[in-house]
Image (tube, rainbow, N blue to C red):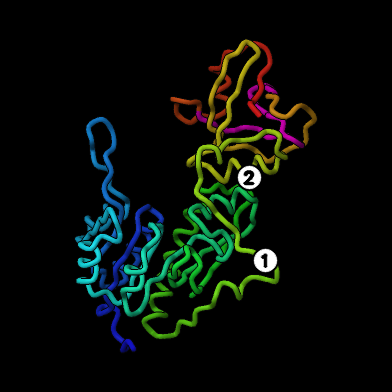
Amino acid sequence: MIKPMDKKDLRIVFFGTPEFAVESLKRLVEGGYNIVGVVTMPDKPAGRGHHLLQSDVKRYAVEHGLRVLQPVRLKDEAFVDELRSLKAHLQIIIAFRMLPEVVWAMPPMGTFNLHASLLPKYRGAAPINWAVMNGDTRTGVTTFFLKHEIDTGDIIEQRDIAIGRTDNVGVVHDKLMLLGADMVMHTVEAILAGTVHPVAQEQLLTAGQEPTPAPKIFKDTCQIHWTWPAERVYNHIRGLSPYPAAWTVMADEAGGRWQLKILATAEPQAACGTPGRVMIEGRRMLVNCGDGAVEITRLQPAGKKPMSADEFLRGLHFTGSLSMDL
């Protein structure tokens, strides 16, 4: 049984890597919580000069004088011993690797995770991308206590937001980052006050319903298939923009080929034509889909900077008609 304590006496270890996690760490530090350690990914070589790339979480932690741990293996005895020596009451995980039980079961108040979806919907590595790619109109954030299987623990709290019709994944990411930081603070306060009543995820599923997966995004995932309905193409593109970005290959009749990242399109519109056919109307660039068409408004040719479709077309030299690989 943990006795009630002041937040300055609550010893917290924070696990995280990307920008999404920094906002929550920042709120905890500015809120006066006692962050006794920050665990993040090891630095990675970047560029020809072998410059070491630090995670966003590490940069923030170093700037604010926080103790940083960067284990290669989370089961390594030296790391586990060092973590144990911090005597944390609570651990918080945001956008980090899957933890072994020896780590997540260590603190007496438990280990909770902030996940960027309304669990049990979108369990997995890319919940924000898949929510937008699937055309969802709402998403949210969840805090839950860790257990063996990934993203399956008992839910502490959830909050939701609307996904705007023109929102891309970058916009939704930033909304959830701020909402998630608010909820992390509220969750810590509730744990400290002893008012948490976790709910099993199975209780949130209706009869016959299954949890929704949100697997990691790979290059093949990002390819646009122009035989899809225009609505699906539209959602696919905004669900991957600005990063890692949906892509396609455009070709002309003489064999010229251009690999393109498609960063934005206008709303789907009616069209009648062969899927993948590119229609140039003035400085507008439309592509037929399985039903309807989308107008590409922003793109990035391989090896070049992002640009508007107008800029791309002004520099494009092609022979005959244009089409996208299906």
Disc 2 on helix, strand or loop? helix
Which residue was labeled with disc 1? Answer: 209
- Specify whether 62 is left or right of 178: left
In reply to whether residue 290 is colored magenta, the answer given is: yes
How far across and how far down the image is residue 151, in percent?
A: 49, 64
**Label 1 to label 2: alpha-carbon separation:** 24 Å
Q: Is residue 66 visible?
A: no
In front of the other: 245 or 42:
42
- What residue is shown at x 31% (from left), y 65% (from top)? 14
Residue type beneath disc 1: Gln
Q: Nearer the viewer, residue 244 or 8?
A: 244
Q: Is residue 208 left or right of residue 239?
A: right
Instruction: Find residue 138 and report its horizontal and vertical position in percent.
Output: 61, 60
Q: Amino acid at mark 2?
A: Asn
The residue tagged 2 is 235
Image quarter (top left, top right, bottom left or bottom right) of the N terminus:
bottom left
39 versus 267 height, above or below? below
**Secondary structure mainly formed by the magenta segment:** strand
- Apparent side of residue 109 relative to residue 50 in the rendered image (left or right): right
Instruction: Tell me how many marks there are.
Output: 2
The percent position of residue 123, horizontal first and vertical second, equals 53, 60
Residue with the most extreme right position: 272
Res 2 visible: yes
Residue 2 placement: quadrant: bottom left
For residue 180, above or below residue 171: below
The residue stretch that appears in magenta = 279-300
Mark 2 Cα shell of 10 Å, populated few (<14), some (14-19), many (≥20)? many
